Image (spheres, rainbow, N blue to C red):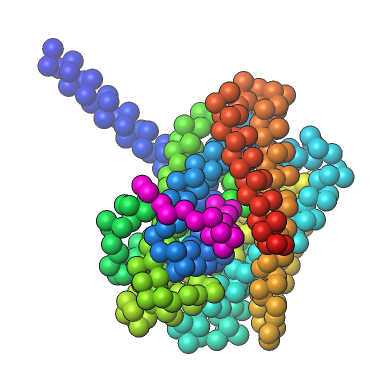
């Protein structure tokens, strides 16, 4: 009897270790895609939210988490079941003409987004008194080398390390000595305001959680990793953990700025301002930690964005694409990636470049394209010819369409409030 119990216990232990090893093997796409949310634009949005409204906007992290999990789960499932990228599926189901206009718009928007990431590199390094004419070219070359000379496994490991480094914002927040009682109250009973500025920040926080290019990267990463339907349950946990880490980082960025800048009545215009403003309030270490986080996030996104863009544009038009392929095997993919890196970095080096205008119009393009991409996505995930028995069930469709309706509503509201 005792031997049977020991045998059963030993079997359970082996199953636990087996499941853990399988999960670690699958781990990557969900965490990386989620972490890229916290790019230079995202960090700026969270910093401004904390500086302007203190802890008042922490409640937005809950809907942001739900949105992220719902959309990324559908992406991962589509990639695993179909074995095709989202761009490929859109071309097959929507036709070449619609695909052409969607991807030209996405290419333009992503060049603007990549420029914003290099602006984050420049701004973060200015805190350390390093000129953008040094930091940006060196960063661009390192990003290019890592993708062109590396493999998918190597790149994924580097991206996971970058994701872990973003947790420095937890340290930066704790240095500001936050008031946990006030944080708890803000989460349970948020002081919601009904004015244009507050609404714009709410839309910005939830909107920065999800961008059009992310959907393509998530699906392509699942395919490039070679995941199968047997890996789905582990992939789901990868998506959930990645989403939680992403929201935790955003949560602590808001807290870091709320407990220091807001309490001292300091307003900021970008994430670099937050890093500099923290110095006299929370000390050198807090300022350095915040700037380091901004640098890592900007480098991370400046790598992923051009890769994702080159991947889905090539996929949409039938060219070979993928980090694991050599230059000879996928020349269009690598040339497009190189072009986006050069343009993004070069714009930052132009004296008095209109960065605010570039950021604004790239966000406008994202806002216009996001509903189109999401509607295409949910129609495809409900197509039995593509998904077979793995189409959305009723609950998933309710969550999916509700999420998409809210995001479209927020996008329209942002446009209306901006013009008003």
The outermost residue toward the front is 194
- Residue 369 picture location, percent across and down: 73, 51
Q: Residue furthest left?
A: 2
Residue 385 colored in magenta in the image: no
* 328 lies left or right of 247: right
Viewer-proximal residue, 330 or 110? Answer: 110
Q: Nearer the viewer, residue 258 or 166?
A: 258
Front residue (pair 345, 63): 63
Q: How many circles with numbers are drawn on the protein?
A: 0
Instruction: Give the extent of the magenta segment.
Output: 188-209
Q: Give the side of residue 260 with respect to residue 223, left or right.
A: left
Q: Can residue 160 be seen?
A: no
User: For the point 78% across and 50% down, which residue is it?
Assistant: 102
324 on left or right of 6: right
Left or right of 182, for residue 407? right
The spot of residue 240 in percent (x, y) is 45, 41
- In the displayed structure, 272 sits above or below 144; it is below
Report x, y in % for residue 186. 37, 54
Residue found at the very far right of the displayed protein:
97
Please tell me which residue lies in front, 21 or 70: 70
Which residue shows up at 49% across the image and 45% down it? 63
Identify the residue at horizontal 51%, vertical 59% (top origin).
38
The answer to which image quadrant residue 181 occupies is bottom left
Q: Position of residue 171 (x, y in %)?
A: 32, 65
Res 131 seen here: yes
Does 193 lie within the magenta span?
yes
Quadrant including the N terminus: top left
Residue at 76% across / 62% down in the picture? 108
């Amino acid at each position: 009897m005792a031997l049977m119990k020991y045998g059963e216990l030993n079997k359970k232990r082996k199953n636990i270790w087996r499941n853990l090893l399988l999960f670690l093997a699958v781990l990557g796409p969900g965490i990386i895609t989620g972490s890229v949310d916290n790019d230079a634009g995202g960090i700026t949005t969270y910093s401004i939210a904390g500086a302007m409204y203190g802890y008042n906007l922490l409640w937005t992290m809950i809907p942001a988490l739900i949105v992220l999990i719902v959309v990324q789960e559908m992406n991962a499932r589509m990639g695993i079941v179909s074995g095709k990228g989202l761009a490929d599926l859109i071309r097959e189901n929507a036709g070449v003409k619609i695909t052409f206009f969607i991807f030209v718009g996405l290419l333009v928007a992503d060049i603007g987004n990549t420029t914003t990431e290099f602006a984050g590199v420049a701004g973060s390094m200015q805190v350390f008194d390093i000129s953008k004419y040094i930091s940006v070219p060196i960063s661009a070359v390192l990003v290019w080398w890592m993708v062109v000379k590396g493999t998918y496994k190597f790149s994924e490991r580097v991206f996971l390390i970058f994701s872990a480094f973003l947790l420095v914002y937890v340290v930066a927040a704790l240095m500001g000595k936050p008031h946990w009682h006030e944080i708890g109250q803000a989460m349970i009973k948020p002081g919601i305001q009904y004015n244009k500025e507050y609404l714009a920040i709410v839309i910005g926080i939830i909107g920065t959680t999800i961008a059009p290019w992310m959907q393509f990267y998530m699906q392509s990463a699942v395919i490039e990793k070679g995941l199968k339907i047997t890996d789905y349950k582990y992939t789901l946990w990868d998506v959930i953990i990645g989403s939680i880490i992403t929201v935790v980082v955003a949560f602590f960025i808001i807290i870091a700025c709320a407990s220091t800048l807001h309490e001292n009545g300091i307003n900021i215009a970008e994430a670099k301002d937050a890093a500099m403003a923290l110095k006299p309030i929370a000390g050198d270490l807090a300022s350095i930690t915040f700037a380091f986080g901004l640098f890592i996030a900007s480098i991370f996104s400046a790598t992923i964005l051009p890769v994702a863009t080159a991947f889905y544009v090539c996929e949409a038009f039938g060219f070979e694409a993928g980090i694991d392929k050599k230059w000879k095997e996928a020349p269009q993919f690598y040339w497009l990636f190189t072009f986006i890196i050069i343009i993004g970095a070069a714009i930052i080096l132009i004296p008095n470049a209109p960065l605010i205008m570039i950021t604004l119009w790239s966000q406008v393009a994202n806002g216009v394209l996001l509903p189109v991409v999401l509607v295409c996505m949910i129609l495809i995930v409900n197509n039995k010819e593509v998904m077979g028995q793995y189409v959305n069930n009723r609950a998933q469709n309710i969550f999916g369409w509700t999420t998409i309706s809210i995001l479209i509503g927020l996008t329209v509201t942002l446009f209306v409030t901006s013009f008003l």
